[in-house]
Image (cartoon, helix red, strand yellow):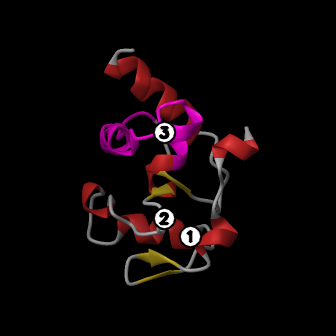
Amino acid sequence: MSNEGFFEKVYRVAKLIPHGRVTSYGAIAKHLGAAGSARMVGWAMNGSNNKDVPAHRVVNRNGLLTGKHHFQGTNLMQQLLESEGILVVDNKIQNFEKHFWDPKNEL
């Protein structure tokens, strides 16, 4: 499987994350049958700038905004999440389980 093909599959899943919900890099990787490829999902999110992908809705498995430095401005990722009703404190999503969307169960 080429990286480009994998990235496109990641983008397809990420585009399905509902407004006000989040998922993790690992959950997307598992859904795509590539458990252990969470870092590659992160690379895909980093390269998704002009692909209309809601990358702000993809966080690490603990609800931390580990990819926030890839967004323009200091708090853009947090601001986008908060505009969808998700509370973020110290770069961590509050009530993570409530907001978590697992593509394996939802798709």
**Mark 2 or mark 3, earlier in chain:** 3
Q: Is residue 62 left or right of residue 69?
A: right
User: Residue under circle 1?
Assistant: 83
The structure residue drawn at horizontal position 33% and vertical position 63%, both measured from the top left corner, is 66
User: Residue under circle 3?
Assistant: 29
Residue 93's x, y, as percent?
Answer: 51, 75
The quarter of the rendered structure image containing the C terminus is top right
Q: Quadrant of residue 77?
A: bottom left
Gap between marks 3 and 1, in whole Å? 26 Å
Could you classify mark 2 by the number of other residues whose Cα lies within 10 Å: few (under 14), some (14-19), or many (20 or more)? some
Up the image or down, 40 lies above or below 80; here it is: above
| Magenta region | 27-51
Up the image or down, 88 lies above or below 15; here it is: below
- What amino acid type should be assigned to the residue bearing mark 2? Leu
Q: Is residue 31 magenta?
A: yes
Could you classify mark 1 by the number of other residues whose Cα lies within 10 Å: few (under 14), some (14-19), or many (20 or more)? few
User: Residue under circle 2?
Assistant: 80
Q: Marks 2 and 1: in contact by CB < 8 Å?
A: yes
Viewer-nearest of labels 2 and 3?
3
